[in-house]
Image (cartoon, helix red, strand yellow):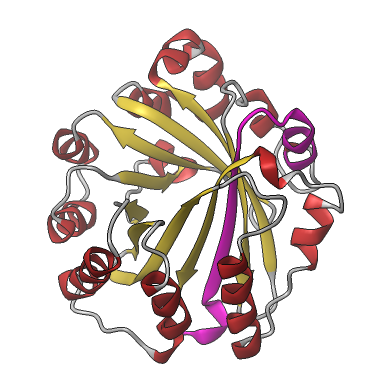
Amino acid sequence: MQSANVQIRKFRRHLTSFASKATPLCIPFLDLLKASPEAHLECTCKVCGDTVHPLRFNLWYKNSGGSGLNPKIVAFLEHYAEIAPIDRSLYHEVIGTDFLFEKVRYNVVGIDLRPDIDSSRIKLWHIVGDYPAMETRALGFAGISPDARRLKIHKGFLFGFDFVFSGASALKVYPVMHDYEIREHHAMLRDIVGEKVTMLAEHCHRVSFGFSTDKAGASAHMIPYHASDFISKIGSKQLSTAFSAIGSNRIIIAMDIDDINSGEYHTFNLYY
């Protein structure tokens, strides 16, 4: 747990690292950050070639066992619904009327703000523990690759939603594999995601594989044993520059699986 002041300093330091400034669209998130000393702030940036999108932040809330969504998160969603035509119908379609919030271990909310307002978005994720019914529902939802079901090895499961300011929305699922599971299911992993991705996964504590209803390709969210060595192995100047700006070795590196297999390392996300 971090105090509100520590989190605000982290928020501002992230913007300074990427020579960026908060915009009025950040205000509802910053208000939530100030009111949430019990949550953990995660900073993130998206790099697309020479373009960096640094106005990306997530707040992780440990679930208290309540039977509904945290009121702070509800208010956060409503604030942005007043700013843009946020469409949450997909969210309600997926979770249904019988969603068991007491099965949720963490709730995560975030912002991803772009110069193009219509491409900006807010995020809502849930991490569930022992909840097979919800796993089956999310993994089997129309538009999610069957590969996601094959990779669902570990008990923990993350799924979530992007609510784009244009009114579009997407479901995302993230089956995770820890290092011992990567070793145990090496052949299956190589068959599904390819040799290059599997080789990188072997240097990670764990990897979450992301699948979405808004695109055909998948992504790999990797937590490396040794971040600097891992990034050197990838050999991307843009990635190295962003890593240096962050100044943290405790990171998650997310890249499209097709990009890794083709050797194209120009688009990625960093989380810390």
- In the rendered view, does 102 fall on the left or right side of 201? right
The one nearer the camera, 266 or 170, is 170
Name the residue: 59% across, 24% down: 155
Q: Residue furthest right?
A: 97
Residue 122 image position (x, y, % from top left): 55, 70
Against 38, residue 88 (above or below) is below
Whether residue 15 is visible: yes
Residue 1 image position (x, y, % from top left): 32, 50
Which image quarter: residue 51? Answer: bottom left
Whether residue 113 is visible: no
Which image quarter: residue 49? Answer: bottom left
Which image quarter: residue 133? Answer: top right
- In the rendered view, does 186 fall on the left or right side of 223? right
The one nearer the camera, 195 or 181, is 181
Q: Residue furthest top?
A: 184
Against 249, residue 20 (above or below) is below
Name the residue: 42% across, 72% down: 35
- In the rendered view, does 257 fall on the left or right side of 95? left
Name the residue: 29% across, 24% down: 203
Residues rendered magenta in the picture: 113-138
Residue 124 image position (x, y, % from top left): 59, 60
Name the residue: 48% across, 36% down: 208
Against 186, residue 46 (above or below) is below
As for residue 132 lying within the magenta part, the answer is: yes
